[in-house]
Amino acid sequence: MSAPPETVAGAPGNVIETRELRKVYRDRAVVDGLTLTVGAGEVFGFLGPNGAGKSTTVKMLLGLVIPSGGEARVLCGSPADPAVRARLGFLPEQFRFQLWMTAEEFLNFHGQLAGMKSNELRTRVPQVLEEVGLGGRGGEQLSGYSKGMLQRCGLAGAILARPQLVFLDEPTSALDPIGRVEVREIIERLKGEGVAVFLNSHLLSEVEQVCDRVAFVKAGRVLQQGSMRELMGGVIPVSVRVDRLTSELRAALQGIGEIHREDTNTPGRADLDLWLQSEAQVPAVAAAIHAAGAQLYALTPRRPDLESLFLELIEGPAGHAHGGHHA
Ligand SMILES: Nc1ncnc2c1ncn2[C@@H]1O[C@H](COP(=O)(O)OP(=O)(O)OP(=O)(O)O)[C@@H](O)[C@H]1O
């Protein structure tokens, strides 16, 4: 048994606060002391490898799974409180639809469960159908819907009752690139309306484009959380391609920045990621390459990307590094 947790205050600016949240299944902690904060109106990316405990965390935040320890405050209350739950929206990864219903019937049913009045539903249902790109299709039976249409319908259900906080678990897994852009626009619109979004997604480029802050979880613990800039600690990743990487050149580059992900598998070519502290160091990289007698084929500063961060944190030798807020 763990020690009694400290109480989470539930600051008014935060929609989610957890402290040392734990879930034990058959003597194994799948969520193991998870502490994170999500601010009001924030789009928050929750990232981690398969089995990291993301879905279990979301279920605890929704009051669907009872924690074994620690504390979770959602909208300044308990996730078990029906008044709190009424202000939450949820799109699960694997949604079970009542396929004999039309989309309108499905949404009316869910709206009634959420306590919405029928006159409110009459205007709100067509509105959300339009918003998720199903305008004019609400009268069709769900059995005739494609996977992508079902996912859109689930999203319509998640935002129907105008929640203050929406949990989206892999919201674009069944969508084509156009559908993905549309979901991103929906998330941005929600944010504009002051709605907070908690996003589980494996599509890192998607998370990167839409999230204000992210948390990386592994084995039920938050490795880091913060904005992209905070997490990267101001580092600029630069892609370098040369014809060969001699030990002399490697040493010279290490004197300028930090080498990450080196690929020398193709004869006559070496690719590497070099992390610099400032763009002003880029000419020094080119000079070092020339001085070492190597041929330079590419030298491209990139925006800090989640994929390098993710790999660094989740698979990196130390498991954590580089700025940001350690949780
Ligand atoms: N009801 C349960 N009983 C026993 N073990 C469970 C239960 N639910 C989840 N687990 C285990 O807890 C671990 C974390 O699962 P969880 O679904 O939370 O991970 P996840 O990060 O959401 O993974 P994914 O990215 O694959 O969806 C897994 O090893 C899973 O097998």
Image (cartoon, rainbow, N blue to C red):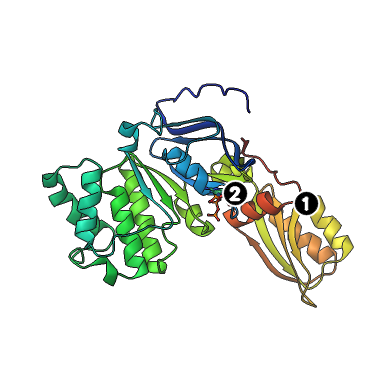
Q: Mark 2: is the Cβ under 8 angstroms from ligand 1? A: yes
Q: Amino acid at mark 1?
A: Ile
Looking at the rendered structure, the kind of residue marked 2 is Ala
Camera sees residue 280 = no
Instruction: Residue at the far left: name it.
Output: 119
| Residue 17 visible, this orientation | yes
Residue 41's disc number: none
Measured as percent of width and height from the top left, residue 43 is found at 43, 45
**219 in relation to 138, above or below:** above
Q: Quarter of the image holding residue 253?
A: bottom right
Considering the numbered disc 1 on the image, is that residue within a helix, a strand or a loop? helix
Instruction: Name the residue beneath numbered marker 1.
Output: 256
* Among the two numbered marks 1 and 2 on one chain, the one whose residue lies closer to the N terminus: 2
Which residue lies under the disc numbered 2? 52
| Residue at x 23% of width, y 58% of height | 129
Q: Are marks 1 and 2 in contact (CB under 8 Å)?
A: no
Residue at x-position 70% and y-position 54%: 315
